[in-house]
Image (tube, grey):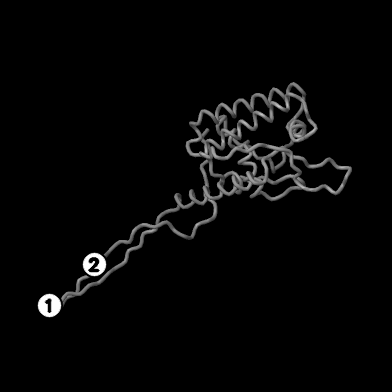
Amino acid sequence: KTVFSEQLVIFPVDVDHAFAVLQSRAHELWARFFSSSLGDGLRYTPSDCFETFPMPLDWENNKALEKAGEAYYTYRAELMVRHNEGMTQTYNRFHDPEELSEDIFHLRDLHDAMDRAVLDAYGWDDLQPECTFLLEYEEEDTKKKKPWRYRWPEAIHDEVLARLLDLNQTRALEEAPPTTKTSKKTTSTNSSTNKSKKKTKASHQQPTTELPLLASIKPPND
């Protein structure tokens, strides 16, 4: 019998496009930026990490995303079955710089290709990241395994995060309800009856400036 933690997050999507984006390093760095910590890992909260994440435009119809997501998902599943390993063991090998098996090399290549498809979906073909093994933090206990991670260099990490934040702010402005103010302007005439006439003029609709930092997206349809 398996008892799942209340911290488990499930995405009820059955399309490879969504899988590619949510499994990408772009979404991972977004999640790590907005998540709280849980030991050495992170506490993923959908309200902070998923609902605020600016998905690429028209991602549902992006064939490159679909192809990359399907290839990565299928191969990873076959790899875990072949070695009788779960996610944790598989990704421990994935991030281990001393792991030289061909199947892990291929999994890394597929992940890089999936990230490439995601960056292209955003229109960021000027970014050409190359992953490398970097320490997440310095481990003082020499008996513990060093926290290596196969990931983007810091410069690419910061650039992608900055672009996602800018895109999020743009979406927030676009989704904000417009405000309409009606101002009244009164003019007087020098007619013989000395009557004043009032003219009403509606102001232009402007996006509200009191916006949250983050916009929300609609979860994919079933």
Q: For the residue labelled by badge 2, is the local secondary structure a helix, a strand or a loop?
A: strand
Up-down relation of residue 167 to residue 193 (above or below): above
Q: Nearer the viewer, residue 218 or 88?
A: 88
Q: Nearer the viewer, residue 107 or 200?
A: 107
Q: Say left or right for 45 vs 185.
A: right
Real-space Cα distance between discs 1 and 2?
18 Å
Q: Nearer the viewer, residue 221 or 100?
A: 100
Q: For the residue labelled by badge 1, is the local secondary structure a helix, a strand or a loop?
A: loop
Tags 1 and 2 touching, CB below 8 Å? no
Q: Position of residue 84 (x, y in %)?
A: 77, 24
Up-down relation of residue 191 to residue 181 (above or below): below
Outermost top residue: 82
Q: Residue drawn at (58%, 49%), measured in percent from left and top?
A: 162
Mark linked to residue 193: 1
Mark linked to residue 208: none
- Type of amino acid under label 2: Lys
Q: Residues within 10 Å of mark 1 (few under 14, many from 20)?
A: few
Outermost left residue: 192
Look at mark 2 in the image and give the residue it sits on. Answer: 199
Q: Residues within 10 Å of mark 2 (few under 14, many from 20)?
A: few
Q: Position of residue 17 (x, y in %)?
A: 55, 32
Q: Residue drawn at (29%, 68%), measured in percent from left and top?
A: 184
Going from N to C along the chain, the mark reached first, 1 or 2, is 1
- Type of amino acid under label 1: Thr
Q: Say left or right for 193 vs 173.
A: left
Q: Position of residue 177 (x, y in %)?
A: 42, 53
Name the quadrant of the N terminus.
Answer: top right
Q: Say left or right for 206 vs 33.
A: left
